[in-house]
Amino acid sequence: MAKCFLVLEDGTIMEGTGFGHLGDASGEVVFSTGMGGYQESLTDPSFSGQILTMSYPLIGNYGVSPNDVESDRVQVSGFVVRELCDVPSPGYGGRPLGPYLEEQGIPGIAGVDTRSLIIKIRSAGTMKGAIVHDDPEGALERVRRMPHPAEDNLVGKVSTKEVLHFPRPGAKRVAVLDCGVKLSIMEELRRRFDVYQLPYDTGVKFFRDHEIDGVFLTNGPGDPSHPSLTGTIVATLRRIRDDYPMMGICMGNHLICQAFGGSTFKLKFGHRGENQPVRFRDRVFITSQNHGYAEDPATLEGSGLEIDQVNVNDGTVEGLRHRELPIFSVQYHPEARPGPRDTGFLFDDFVKMLEARR
């Protein structure tokens, strides 16, 4: 493997060996605390525009499989690991990670002190960075000058470009406003509903014309207050919020917050992994998470939304529920791929919510 460098905007240059695609890449450098699930993370559209660092020291030991993808391609800009396993365990039947990333055009870097890197991110916050194969000092200047990836309309890049219909005779009809939906979320919905998967900027007319029973708001990448979202999907939600039951996950939680007048803020280093504790209904649930923003509780006063779930570690908002309307959302991922399935019942709660409106 060729010499490779991870360059951070604060001037840090970490040397390692390249794997996957031997090209350069840039993005926001983030980390995940998950011990497994690296392929699901690599293909999660919410990681678009980001260089993902895994905290677990050995990655690739069970290879990659077509059964463990969350979209049709790798979504991260780059991948950082402490140690790469080139020969996956034959018991899992997976193929090696390196050739998989090479086919997808995604560079990786191994041999990095990921513990030191994650401590730096936790202390200073996520930052812009790049994976390069030569001239790291020159790359540092380019990293410092480049715009932050979240300034781009990342949702527009990962949302479906056409209306997709997954019929289920006799089931309630749900419109999924796709901000970068994971395949496992679609699987949960398709088992329960007649589903229309829609571009994120679909207007009000579609809902009226297709006799929609409920609206689902998906996960997705980037800044939830980006003008491309506030001017489209948030504006649509404000027009239909009194007419349809709604459920949101991750980005969907942010969008519902804004639709009722609340606002969000960027977290220092975010929540990414499969071990985040959430207090809900007098219990603590362990949840899978992938987000870099949170709701500002002070802006929810008078919105009609109440905070019914909080993160045990830092007290940030993990769930919202409207006091009068059939609307709720969560910041974590109840579909849990990867991660614990403690909160999978929330999809059934949405079914009950729609059935109650007969």
Image (cartoon, helix red, strand yellow):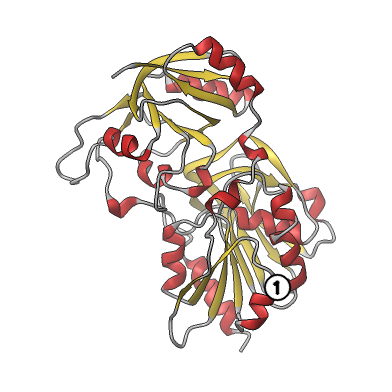
Camera-side residue of 292 and 21: 21
Q: For residue 308, which quarter of the picture?
A: bottom right
Camera-side residue of 26 and 289: 26
| Left or right: 59 as drawn, with respect to 76 | left
Return the x and y of residue 176 as percentages of the image width and height.
56, 67
Which residue appears at 32% of the width and 17% of the height?
Answer: 2
Return the x and y of residue 252 as percentages of the image width and height.
62, 58
| Left or right: 320 as drawn, with respect to 118 | right
Which residue appears at 60% of the width and 29% of the height?
Answer: 126
Q: For residue 200, which quarter of the picture?
A: bottom right
Most extreme residue toward the left, as rendered?
90
The residue identified by callout 1 is: 204
Which residue appears at 27% of the width and 48% of the height?
Answer: 65
Asked if residue 81 can be seen in this view, the reply is no
Number of labels in the image equals 1
Vertical comparison of 225 with 143: above or below? below
Vertical comparison of 125 with 297: above or below? above
Task: Name the quadrant of the N terminus.
Answer: top left
Camera-side residue of 350 and 214: 214
Return the x and y of residue 147 as percentages of the image width and height.
66, 30
What's the amino acid at mark 1?
Answer: Val
Vertical comparison of 219 with 133: above or below? below
